[in-house]
Image: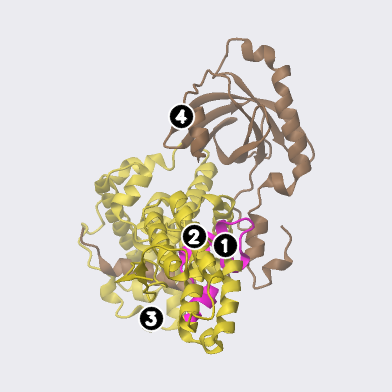
Chain colours: A brown, B yellow
Amino acid sequence: MTLPTSIVELLRWRAAQAEAEAPPAPRAARLLRLGRPWWEVWPDRFRVAAARVTARHVAYGHAMTAPPGRGGHPVPAVIVRERDDLETCARVLFLSLRDDRLRLRFHLEDDVGDDAAMCDATFIAAESARVLFDARAIRSAENEYRVDAGIPASLADEWAPLRVTDRKPFRLILRAAKPLDGQSEISTRSPDLTSS
Amino acid sequence: MSTVICSLPCTHWFCQTLRFPAAVVTDDVEGLLPRAIGLGASGAAARKAGDEWAADGFFREALDAARTALQRLDDRHSPATRLDVLRAGICFALDCGRVEEAQTFLAQVAAVEPAAGAAEDWAPLRDVDAWPDEWLVAAVRRDPPVESALDALAERYWKPLFARCQFLTLDRNKAHDLAQEAWCRVLRARHALRPGGNFPAYLTAVATNIWRDWHRSARRAGGMAEHRLASLDAEVACDDGGTRSCLGDAMPDLNSIAAAEQRLLMLDVDHALAQLSPLLREILVSRFLAEESCAEIGRRHGRSEQTISGWVRQGIRELKHYLAEPQRCTSPRIAAR
């Protein structure tokens, strides 16, 4: 393909300008602090939410044995909100595992809140409440979310036989995700002085 | 001890100066060091092949051998041999991400020969900022991650990442958020990082994925701009029949333009980029800033190389069109065309 070099040069020139005007790189300490998963930042909230969501199989025992309506077996879920947690249920509508990627679509019985267009979904083991992985869930329709995430190979092997209608070996803890609002300051102040 | 004079290959760039007579493998220094270097070469090969599990094993063994060789050094060995053993130990420690151990070895270098400690050929081992990505990534993978290595890595790739994020978001603050979020995402999955992989490309891909997710969620629709995707394969005629000459004809030297005019030109470029669909913008960033091939981009999007190539052409055509549109231009240089 013959490229019109001038446009390419223009784009690269603009990128060079953006680089020249880039704010300073955040310090490692700040990145590590920001990169900590929420269950490490708020272990108590996680413990409570995990205990609630893993205990739910008793309460939902009847529902799980009943013929599923829309989607497969309900997956107990907890929505972690600012003030309280809300127990709810997710119906898996689509599930695909290929090349260590999980593609999942589910319908929530309750709203995640704040008109959340996306949420952080933490997948925990149904039995042990251990965190398996977390992923971004994006709303595609009313209370319907989809996940497309790479998962550990061992988990992908274990879950490979799963079908939409099967009982799921995981539980969900959901949190509304903050949008990319560009509200964070990018002044030259020391990043280490900011709280996480 | 009988020795066979031949140099053992070592693929590591800092070890290339090490040449030891290969020996009948013994457990003395003359046997251990070639063994360590051989293991290091295997580790480097495994890392290059993407087999990090095997690479880690080889490098650990190489480090063990170098450690043992160091313990067995005695008065019979020359300072040069000591320095060679230390150099190998430092390299293998850094290959494993063991920065503290490498620093311990470096301290011993100065003790063996003070001049060597300050010599220029040791500087790339001392200076974290000069370490190759694979050493920095290996150090970041560890628990806890080595902050100095992460600082060096962040410093090295922050600005290009920010620039790409700015192209995607067309907003300085959002670009900052996006770049930071990409780093956070990478760090949360840092144990899975491959030191032999292309770290900057991975970082850019993570940022692009996050941006795509945000964009999709903002639209609250399945699939990003599907109505636009459908039209991309079709030819879109330019106002003048698509025969417009290159914009570059009017721009003899971008860097020689006065500051105020450069600012206007930047606004023009941003304005033109904003007119593109997010997908086309992403494709142009991937193709011309990340320098991915159309085939690579196609694999990520699940499209053929030809389709991506068509999108690239489409993006360039649209950019030219918007840049040359007089009523939208603020730069007299562009508007004059």
* Residue occupied by mark 1: B176
Q: Which chain carries label 4?
A: A
- Disc 2 marks a residue whose amino acid type is Cys
Q: Which of B23 and B248 is in front in this view?
A: B23
Write the start and end of the magenta stretch as one range: B122-150
Marking on residue A96: 4
* Residue occupied by mark 2: B165
Q: Could you tell me how far apart the alpha carbons at marks 1 and 2 are, in whole angstroms?
A: 8 Å
Quadrant location of the N terminus of chain A in the rendered image: bottom left
Between disc 1 and disc 2, whose residue precedes?
Answer: 2
Q: Could you tell me how far apart the alpha carbons at marks 4 and 2 are, in whole angstroms?
A: 31 Å
SS under mark 3 = helix
Residue A135 on image: x %, y %: 57, 41
Whether the magenta-drawn stretch holds residue B206 is answered as: no
* Residue occupied by mark 3: B255
Q: Nearer the viewer, residue B285 or B195?
A: B195
Between disc 2 and disc 3, whose residue precedes?
Answer: 2
Select label 1 or label 3 by which is in front: 1
Q: Which quarter of the figure has residue A7?
A: bottom left
Select label 4 or label 1 by which is in front: 4
Residue B337 on image: x %, y %: 29, 71
- Disc 3 marks a residue whose amino acid type is Asn
Q: Are marks 4 and 1 in contact (CB under 8 Å)?
A: no
**Most frequent secondary structure within the magenta stretch:** helix
SS under mark 4 = strand
Residue B130 seen in this snapshot:
no
